[in-house]
Amino acid sequence: MESIKPTLLSQTLELTFTQEADCCSNEEQFLTIKTDNGGGGDFYVLETKRWSFDTIEELIETLNSFKEKHNKIKENKL
């Protein structure tokens, strides 16, 4: 009898960042960055109700943090 081999249907990486409320809100803020891949290659998704930043560089730093983790996973073929 031939063994049944599983097929990877999709793969995701999801990180959620948090920060304190800014001066115009009173709620903690959450930013979720994730990848999805339904077989045609990775794409990226951002989810947030509110995420404030003082400079574009701060946002880029957060995105680069995600990118580094995503690249490690791709390099190790996890």
Image (tube, rainbow, N blue to C red):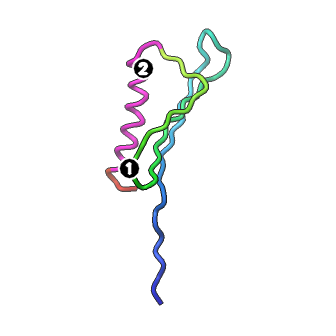
| Above or below, comparing residue 10 to residue 52 in the picture | below
The stretch of residues the image draws in magenta is 54-74
Q: Identity of the amino acid at label 2?
A: Glu
Q: Quarter-wise, where is residue 69 in the image?
A: top left
Percent from the top left, x then y, of residue 62?
43, 28
Name the residue that disc number 2 marks. Answer: 58
Q: Quarter-wise, where is residue 65 in the image?
A: top left
Q: Residues within 10 Å of mark 2 (few under 14, many from 20)?
A: few
Q: Foreground: 61 or 49?
A: 49
**Labels 1 and 2: the sequence-earlier one:** 1
Q: Foreground: 63 or 46?
A: 46
Q: Residue at x 42, y 55 (%)?
A: 39
- Does dot 2 land on a helix, a strand or a loop? helix
Q: Residue at x 65, y 14 (%)?
A: 25
The label on residue 25 is none
Percent from the top left, x then y, of residue 45?
49, 37
Percent from the top left, x then y, of residue 36?
47, 47
| Above or below, comparing residue 48 to residue 35 in the picture | above
- Does dot 1 land on a helix, a strand or a loop? loop
Percent from the top left, x then y, of residue 72?
35, 46
Q: Identity of the amino acid at label 1?
A: Gly
